Amino acid sequence: MASLAVLCLAAALLAADAPAPPAAPPAPAAAAPATPSATAPVPPALSGRALGEELQRAARDRRVEQAALAQERQRLEALAADIERARAALREETARLQALAAAASKAPAPPEAPRAPAARPTGLRPGAKPPPTPAALAARTVRNLRPEQAAAMLAHLDRGAAAAILREMRPADAAAVVDRMAPDAGAELLTLLARSPAP
């Protein structure tokens, strides 16, 4: 019995010497319910008169919008009608052109017009020789010169004119003149003579 009392006394002393446990933090206070004035202002209630005016304004806006839509619909319908008329006219014109093309491909080709005879110089009788050309007259003059003189004179002329004069001369006389010319000038004249068609 005495030992039980000693054990109880020892337990009490140990409990007194032990540090006290930390106090629990105080519980947060309950949040107060938000009042309507703290979040957003409540709009004032519409009166009967204000509500009627708002409904009338909405009805007017709806009528204006419907009228605008009706006008736009009429404009689009008129545009569609114009496009359809243009398409019909284009189809008709295409059919007409195709018919003309088919008729033209089946029609025989027109006969060629006879060629007109070459015009004779004025005042010539049929069968008469035409008058000499200026190149032929110049060739007669060059033939009366010595080959050296003719070569020097033709070297100073335009290459086309010199070739035309040589073409009117007899081949032997023209060869004698070209033989007395510088090789480059003679070669150029012979090239012009070879490329120019015979009269």
Image: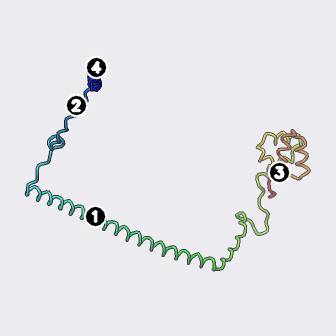
Considering the numbered disc 4 on the image, is that residue within a helix, a strand or a loop? helix
Against 5, residue 156 (above or below) is below
Which callout, 3 or 1, points at the residue further toward the start of the chain? 1
Circle 2: residue type: Pro
The CA distance from mark 1 to mark 2 is: 69 Å
Query: Which mark identifies residue 193?
Result: 3
Kindly identify which residue carries mark 4.
Answer: 17
Q: Which of these two is toward me, 73 or 79?
A: 73
Marks 4 and 2 in Cβ contact (< 8 Å): no
The CA distance from mark 4 to mark 1 is: 94 Å
For the point 85% across and 41% down, the residue is 151
Q: Is residue 108 visible?
A: yes
Q: In which quadrant is the C terminus drawn?
A: bottom right
Which callout, 4 or 1, points at the residue further toward the start of the chain? 4
Q: Pinpoint residue 168: horizontal percent, then vertical percent.
A: 83, 53
Q: Pinpoint residue 71: horizontal percent, then vertical percent.
A: 28, 65
For the point 26% across and 25% down, the residue is 5
Query: Residue 15's quadrant in the figure?
Result: top left
The CA distance from mark 4 to mark 2 is: 26 Å
Q: Is residue 19 visible?
A: no
The CA distance from mark 4 to mark 3 is: 145 Å
Q: Looking at the image, is mark 4 or mark 1 nearer the viewer?
A: 4
Kindly identify which residue carries mark 1.
Answer: 69
Kindly identify which residue carries mark 2.
Answer: 26
For the point 83% across and 41% down, the residue is 185
